[in-house]
Image (cartoon, rainbow, N blue to C red):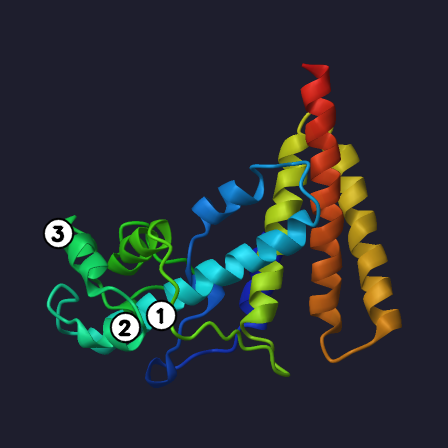
Amino acid sequence: MFRLALILLLLPTIAAADWSPRPSMFHYDATFANCTATPDETDLAQNCDRAIANAYVLKRAVAWATQNCFPESIATCALPFEDEGLPAIAAQIAVDAGCDATNVLDLPEDEPLPADHCISIASDIMIDEGVVPLNTDISCGINWIECGDISLINATFWAEQVDAAAQDDPAFAADLQSRNREDCAEEAREIGSWAVVMDAMICEADRSAALWADLTDQNQQDQ
């Protein structure tokens, strides 16, 4: 809950007229499943961060296209998708599947889009097909609204994996996580940059992922 609250604090209030997609408005379940598929892989957290970013830019493109189509149905609105480098047929398939076409401006800003929303379903179809949008840039300026959000999502995910892997000894996991947060915050402050908080989250993700891999290996040996 703390990390979810932090996500919301990091995000600026976005007026309807200035709406834009952001990483925290999407689910990444399929991406997360891939992140934990090979526990012995090196650079688990960094690879997962890139995977989240890749999924996000695709979902962002679908969201932009969908919003630019509104109020027209995305089933008959091909040009905005083509402008993003996306196959409009995926949107048509999503509509045929009975997706929820609620305008994103009418949905809660602080919650991910429903899994049955047209943006969610169309995105999943395109990710499965390996679609890459034209714009893959991630905003990482002084407000680091996109890259910082992705770093927080990644750090939160790996912390949750540690908690799950150490569920037989939650106090042990909590102590390690607390030490990691403190150590990473101190390291980030010592290095110093405009993105101290984000650097700390990247460090946390790396440490949590490594700890999760060790715990997973130990759990497998104990079976």
Q: Which label belongs to residue 65?
A: 2
Residue 150 visible in the displayed image: yes
Instruction: Name the residue rendered at 24%, 78% in the picture.
Output: 68
Q: Position of residue 129 (x, y in %)?
A: 33, 52
Rendered residue at 86%/64% (across/down): 187
Residue 153 occupies quadrant: bottom right
Q: Residue at x 74, y 25 (%)?
A: 218
Q: Are the two marked residues, 2 and 1, in contact with CB atoms closer than 8 angstroms? A: yes
Q: Nearer the viewer, residue 18 or 219?
A: 219
User: Can residue 109 be seen in the rendering of this structure?
Assistant: no
Instruction: Tell whether 84 sits left or right of 34.
Output: left
Report the disc number at residue 61.
Answer: 1
Q: In front here: 15 or 154?
A: 154
Between the residue at mark 2 and the residue at mark 3, the CA separation in whole angstroms equals 18 Å
Q: Are marks 2 and 3 in contact (CB under 8 Å)?
A: no
Q: Which type of secondary structure does the marked residue at label 2 adopt?
A: helix
Q: Amino acid at mark 1?
A: Ala
**Other residues around mark 1 within 10 Å, as few (<14) / some (14–19) / many (≥20):** many
CA gap, disc 1 to disc 3?
20 Å
Q: Give how far across and how far down residue 21 sits, in percent.
A: 40, 71
Residue drawn at x 38%, y 84% as measured from the top left = 18
On the image, the x and y values in percent for residue 147 come to 58, 70
Amino acid type at circle 3 is Asp
Q: Quadrant of the C terminus?
A: top right
